[in-house]
Image: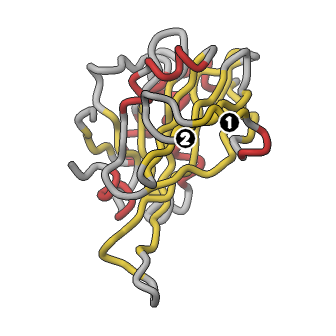
Amino acid sequence: MNRITSIGLAVLMTCIGPNSADAQSAGSTYTSTAPKDCRQIGKPSAPAGTMRLCPGKDGLMVLIAEDDLREIVSVGHNRKAAVEEPAAKIWFAPFNSSETTVEWRAAGAKPFAIIQRWHIADNADSDKRGRPNTKAMLVVTRLPPGTVCHVAYVDAIANPDANELARKAADDFARGFTCGKDEVKIIGTRGRAVELATMH
């Protein structure tokens, strides 16, 4: 997994990059990754487990793969492209799942990032039946052109304005982010979900 860095809200608000003009006109649309809206692929060889391919925006497809109660989410123009992206190699250590609504950030008709809410299992916080409760986190993922990978994490419980923070992170960082070189950014207050997601 990429190395993780922390960045506070105050720093985030001042980090207006060269894409700030584009960010002013950025907007959101939404698609679904619910099984009923996707094509079930079955049990592929890599990544292992079940897989479904869901229609996205601008000809892109969202790949959801699950194995051992852990998911990956990747994006590509087809299954093969999505499986080969860095995002398809990122597994959070605890049990986890992604919600079925994908937010697409786009400038005009061209999407440059997706935002999705994840639930990370917390083994230190269990319910009466002994099942771990989950903690929510937003994941910002950059899109082609270029590779697809995680750009930023926003703890959804520690930050009441998590959605706004995630959108701003997408607008400010996704297009200039270099997968495999740049560090995934922790936006806003670092909470339990982020701690769990960045465990090694």
Q: Secondary structure at mark 1?
A: strand
Image check: 108 left or right of 16? Answer: right
Mark sitting on residue 40:
1
Question: Could one spot residue 172 in this view of the protein?
Answer: yes
Q: Secondary structure at mark 2?
A: strand
Image check: 103 left or right of 113? Answer: right
Q: Nearer the viewer, residue 28 or 99?
A: 99
Image check: 197 left or right of 82? Answer: left
In the picture of the structure, the residue carrying the numbered disc 2 is: 50
Residue shown at 48%/22% (left/top)? 83
Compared with 193, 4 (above or below) is above
Q: Position of residue 124 (x, y in %)?
A: 30, 75
Q: Nearer the viewer, residue 51 or 158?
A: 51
- Residue type at mark 1 is Gln
Q: Nearer the viewer, residue 80 or 12?
A: 80
Q: Position of residue 90 (x, y in %)?
A: 36, 35
Q: Position of residue 169 (x, y in %)?
A: 49, 36
Image check: 59 left or right of 19? Answer: right
The residues tagged by marks 1 and 2 sit, at their Cα atoms, a distance apart of 8 Å
Mark sitting on residue 4:
none
Tag 1–tag 2 contact (CB < 8 Å): yes
Q: Position of residue 147 (x, y in %)?
A: 45, 15
Position of the N terminus, as image quadrant, is top left
- Residue type at mark 2 is Thr
Q: Quadrant of residue 40?
A: top right
